[in-house]
Image: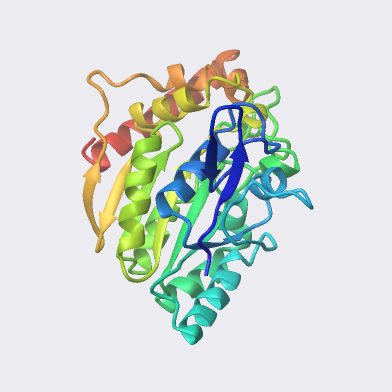
Amino acid sequence: MPTKSITTKTTTKSKKYLFAPGHRACAGCGQNMAARAVIEALGPNTIIANATGCLEVTTSPYPQSAWGVPWIHSLFENAAGIASGIEAALKQKGQDKKVKVLAQGGDGSTFDIGLGLISGMWERNENILYVCYDNEAYSNTGMQASGATPWGSSTTTTPSGSGPTIDAIGSHQNKKDMIAIALAHGLKYVAQTTAGHINDIKKKIIKAASIKGPAYIQILTPCIPGWRIKPDQALLAGRLAAQTGLYPVLEYENGNLTNKLSVPKPAPKVDEYLKMQGRFAHLFKTPQGKTQLKIIQELANENIKKYGL
């Protein structure tokens, strides 16, 4: 049973880490800040099944690892399946009440490639927490569009262009609503937050871990090179995403919306959030792009109304 963490010696003292510094993530990476908050909240008695992606690549280059808990690298699609096997083994050994099983992956492995196995895990009502680090594209393999890519974002597979056609704006598919999909499975706990709300991440993780059965938490994790933002802007981007209403901070218990983070009055316009990101720079250059900015603003307005923000 996992009980130990990595110990790092300094000139003044020793500190134990469940997620150690010195990994290979970009400076200011929103995903790795969120991942550290997640495992610090769960504690040492945790076993992780981690899908292929940026988090796996940056934290586990053999023979090194940033993780101070048992951690298993899975394929893109089967972190949930591996987590199911871990939970079954813990039950057989009578340790399932002592150890928390965490499955985690990016939006590609969650919204797209691994959705079927996640659905099966939820249908079986297994006591597993699933965390999605949503950076809204396949960042690890070159910033291709995923089911989480937002409207108007330029990616390598939905590049912005010129001309009057809809293809010129970048992505023109709506972001998949994974929160609604999780709720449709009858999960007792479903939540959404951002890397700009570290304390909120920890609170939601602690609550999810206390609930018997499957739980889902989705965290917006701004990507420095993929979003083309500065290394010190990931937390700001996460906060603005919530404050504009584009990415609401929400909490559902037993299917009911029990908590939400209200937007400021007046709420920042989506332009303030989008203009800091190179992936949306094309929208500020043409009349067609400015029309899309109005569409994105309306998406935020609809969220504010829908969730009573």
On screen, residue 73 above or below 295: below
Residue 142 in the figure: left or right of residue 112: right
In the image, what residue occupies the spot 26% across and 42% down?
Answer: 306
Give coordinates of residue 112: x percent, y percent: 60, 57
State whether residue 12 appears in this view.
yes
Q: How is the image coloured?
A: rainbow
In the image, what residue occupies the spot 55% across and 28% down?
Answer: 12
In the image, what residue occupies the spot 26% across and 61% down?
Answer: 255
Q: Quadrant of residue 169?
A: top right
Give coordinates of residue 72: x percent, y percent: 65, 63
Residue extending farthest to the right is: 62
State whether residue 174 appears in this view.
no
Of residues 163 and 236, the one nearer the viewer is 236
Of residues 292 and 101, the one nearer the viewer is 101
In the image, what residue occupies the spot 45% across and 18% down?
Answer: 271
Give coordinates of residue 88: x percent, y percent: 51, 81
Give coordinates of residue 10: x percent, y percent: 61, 31
Residue 279 in the figure: left or right of residue 200: right
Residue extending farthest to the bottom is: 92
